[in-house]
Image: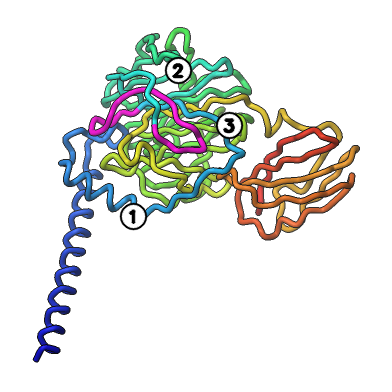
């Protein structure tokens, strides 16, 4: 009899656990559906969308489905960021790219910035655009003090939200990305006057949520409707699918390239205050989680990474070459001087290959590397060069 009673007790406890789990899953589904039904999916999450208890349910859900991958020591820049989420502390500040990704606030702000970037002189320009209308305002932000200087209204010709702003160091031109839930448009912008000029027609993306441009002038955006990464042609505004991101993101967020490494990082917003910092592979589209932002309470509308644009094209070694790129199995190395060492790092800045060469010609086996983008550091006669490597 005791045995039967014990088994019945276990069964009741098990059913209770299952029912509680079913309730949790139902609650999460309902909350996600509520988030998808927001009128302006390109803006910040509404402050009253969830109760504190519901936000906790979402935080537990999103954090349980993310595994952190710490960033390696090759990454040394700082992220300038501004949070637009009213359920957490609002302000402008910095945190290290390598983490921890907790904002050291320089100043508070009530301005909702939905995009921002540096120019070559370290100036930060940002855009505030909170509703579907023709009004969007361009600001200059002092990176040392957080002082905001309004430059002017960008005066959109149709009601849209500005979701991205990025500086192209190749042609010294600023670009902005706009959206209205049906299509995106691309513009150039004169940051001295806030005057915009459209590039091409409507883009193939619908909910492109940020714009990022690398050291070579290659542009990208992520569509939060399809969860795809797109390459953007800055001359025509045409987009090409790179690949699925592997994450489900919503509402306002931003991304930027680390100018020192050429790696793309995105502050991916999930909901309920859950904002995570992702390394983005621009050859496959995949997002790799590097950790939580502000311990799971932030929604970064502005992300601008500081640093000198070294590495991929400018920090090269005279007389050194490598091929093929992209590579599949073997990478050929050739130099006029002695190649001492070659190290390869993944998107997280983690060393995946380290090889002593001590020759002017050599071959490096890269067959074990996963498909994607890498940074290669080459030492020749005590000098260091940095190169971008694509693995097929």
Q: Is residue 337 above or below residue 371?
A: above
Tag 3 secondary structure: loop
Examine the rendering and report whether any part of residue 141 can be seen: yes
Q: Whole-percent x and y of residue 350?
A: 60, 47
Residue 97 on the magenta span: yes
Report the residue that reaches farthest toward the front: 2
Which of pointers 3 and 1 lies earlier in the amino acid sequence? 1
Residue extent of the magenta highlight: 83-102
Q: Whole-percent x and y of residue 361?
A: 88, 48
Q: Quadrant of the N terminus?
A: bottom left
Q: Tell me the mark number nearer the camera, choosing from 3 and 1.
A: 1
Q: Is residue 98 above or below residue 191?
A: below
Residue bearing mark 3 = 214
* Cα separation between marks 3 and 2: 17 Å
Which of pointers 2 and 1 lies earlier in the amino acid sequence? 1
Residue bearing mark 1 = 64
Residue bearing mark 2 = 125
Tell me the quarter of the picture where residue 253 sits. Answer: top left
- Residue beneath the point at 17% across and 41% down: 52
């Amino acid at each position: 009899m005791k045995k039967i009673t014990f088994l019945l007790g276990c069964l009741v406890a098990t059913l209770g656990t299952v029912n509680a789990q079913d309730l949790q899953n139902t609650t999460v589904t309902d909350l996600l559906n509520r988030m998808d039904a927001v009128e302006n999916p390109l803006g910040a999450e509404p402050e009253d969308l969830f109760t504190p208890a519901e936000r906790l349910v979402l935080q537990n859900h999103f954090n349980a489905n993310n595994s952190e991958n710490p960033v390696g020591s090759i990454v040394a820049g700082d992220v300038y960021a501004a949070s637009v989420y009213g359920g957490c502390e609002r302000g402008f500040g910095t945190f290290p790219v390598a983490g921890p990704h907790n904002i050291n606030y320089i100043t508070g702000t009530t301005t909702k910035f939905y995009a921002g970037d540096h120019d070559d002189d370290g100036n930060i320009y940002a855009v505030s655009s909170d509703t579907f209308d023709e009004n969007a305002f361009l600001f200059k932000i002092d990176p040392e003090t957080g002082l905001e200087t309004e430059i002017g209204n960008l005066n959109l010709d149709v009601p849209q939200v500005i979701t991205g702003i990025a500086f192209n160091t190749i042609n010294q031109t600023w670009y902005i990305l706009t959206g209205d839930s049906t299509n995106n448009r691309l513009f150039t912008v004169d940051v001295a006057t806030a005057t915009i000029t459209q590039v091409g027609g409507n883009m193939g993306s619908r909910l492109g949520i940020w714009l990022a441009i690398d050291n070579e002038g290659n542009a990208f955006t992520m569509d939060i409707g399809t969860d795809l990464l797109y390459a953007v042609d800055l001359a025509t505004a045409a987009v090409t699918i790179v690949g699925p991101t592997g994450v489900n993101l919503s509402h306002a967020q931003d991304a930027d390239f680390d100018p020192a490494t050429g790696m793309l990082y995105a502050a991916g917003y999930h909901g309920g205050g859950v904002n995570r910092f992702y390394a983005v592979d621009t050859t496959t589209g995949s997002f790799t989680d590097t950790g939580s932002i502000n311990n799971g309470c932030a929604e970064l509308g502005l992300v601008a990474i500081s640093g000198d644009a070294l590495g991929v094209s400018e920090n090269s070694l005279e007389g050194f070459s490598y091929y093929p790129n992209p590579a599949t199995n073997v990478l050929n190395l050739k130099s006029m001087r002695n190649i001492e060492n070659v190290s390869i790092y993944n998107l997280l800045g983690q060393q995946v290959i380290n090889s002593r060469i001590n020759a002017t010609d050599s071959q490096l086996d890269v067959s074990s590397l996963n498909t994607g983008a890498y940074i290669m550091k080459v030492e020749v006669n005590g000098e260091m060069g940095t190169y971008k490597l694509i693995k097929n």
